[in-house]
Amino acid sequence: MLRSKMFRGIERLDDAAHNNPPFAWGETGLGVAILQAGLIALGYKLPKSVKKKTRAPDGVLGDETFLAVKAFQTAHKLKPDGIAGRKTIRAMDAELPPPAPSVVVKPPRPKGPPRRPKPVGDKPPPPQKLGPPPPVGDKPPEPQPLVMLPESDYYCEGTDDPIPKPDKGAGAWNSAPLTLRSAAIKIAISTSPGFYGATLIGIGPNATKHLVHYFGGSGRDYKIDLEGMFQDNAYVRTNVLDFELACMADYIDACPPGTWNITTKKVIQNDHTYNGKDDSKDWYFAIGGFGVWTKAKARVPKRGKVLADIELKFFDRYNWDGGKKVHIAGIEITDEFMGDFHREGLAKEFNCFGSLKRKMSWERFSRVPPAPPPPGVAY
């Protein structure tokens, strides 16, 4: 397997390194463009083969590239025939810089379902707050405490959204110099009618849409198909959507009578809020890990039916987790590969948002409380 960052992950280079077949005069395509980029990186000038407008190699193995290959072969005591096969490709690969090591950040699949928030009422009630003073001259009424929601580490009264904290991603956009390799691949992707078709078939529709938006380079916010994500992935539907709705409903059921606006205090992101590859390949590459929070407007009676409009909201920063990789149209796409395009200004990371709403109703105090955790297991 080729080791250099320049050649690694390009199927045509792997084939040439096994003489299956080698590069020869007249060939065109992405493989030739990467070969040209490798020659330039090793000090062989190809002024006619680099397009001024795109700053990318032209991908044509013509006279200039053929002579550069012969010059490399001569310098390395190889047969100077201008045919870049096993010995030539591997000799170039050995001299080109290796890629940076990839760090796998995929969270482990947790054992068992997520834990419910701590039961309502586990904290001592706050001091009672008295109402406003009576008008002068009136008989002072008995002080009445303000009606307040139950104490919770998870929920509070209000309509504001908690602030998501995106991960650092690949770094600052357009902060690295453009490389010939990235420029050549971007040209191949943008001009090949089959690239996104292969992505659609090999990965899925949502991963393809997100990839198109990324390479579009606008950086604009993107609204994902959140209903579709939960429909496609049974694991996150059960352990994120159903779980968060149930937790909010449990809290509402414990609230005093009245009409309440309730929100979670922080964005929830844990080992469960992750689209695993085995659960949905499409959403694994489209999103991976994400954060959620819930908001509700609820009417709570003394007795009878509780009515609640609950909204689950979603946030993610589009950037690939360490360890992800997939082969599309002869190119190995990895987290490092994707980050290069962002840092070199050829693509741009973006924020993904989404929301879905559910109307829920139940008889007051009819909800079954969650089972307590086993001894020694904290919430």
Image (cartoon, grey):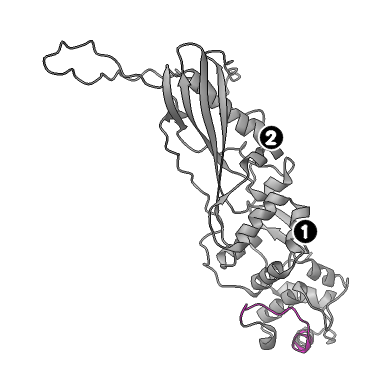
Asked if residue 110 can be seen in this view, the reply is no
Asked if residue 107 can be seen in this view, the reply is yes
Residue bearing the label numbered 2: 235
On whether residue 60 falls in the magenta region, the answer is: yes
Q: Is residue 4 above or below residue 307?
A: below
Question: In the rendered structure, which amino acid carries the disc numbered 2?
Answer: Tyr
Nearest the eye: 289 or 233: 233
Q: Which mark is residue 198?
A: 1
> Which element type, helix, strand or loop, lies under badge 1?
helix
Question: In the rendered structure, which amino acid carries the disc numbered 1?
Answer: Ala
Q: Which mark is residue 361?
A: none
Where is residue 251? Give x, y as percent.
49, 22
Residue 147 picture quarter: top left
Instruction: Find the magenta span and give its range.
Output: 53-70
Nearest the eye: 160 or 30: 160
Where is residue 237? Give x, y as percent.
66, 34
332 with respect to 267 (left or right): right
Callout 2 environment at 10 Å: few (<14), some (14 to 19), or many (20+)?
A: some
> Which element type, helix, strand or loop, lies under badge 2?
helix
Q: Looking at this rendering, what residue extends furthest in the right direction?
A: 20
Number of callouts in the render?
2
Residue at left offset 53%, top offset 23%: 249
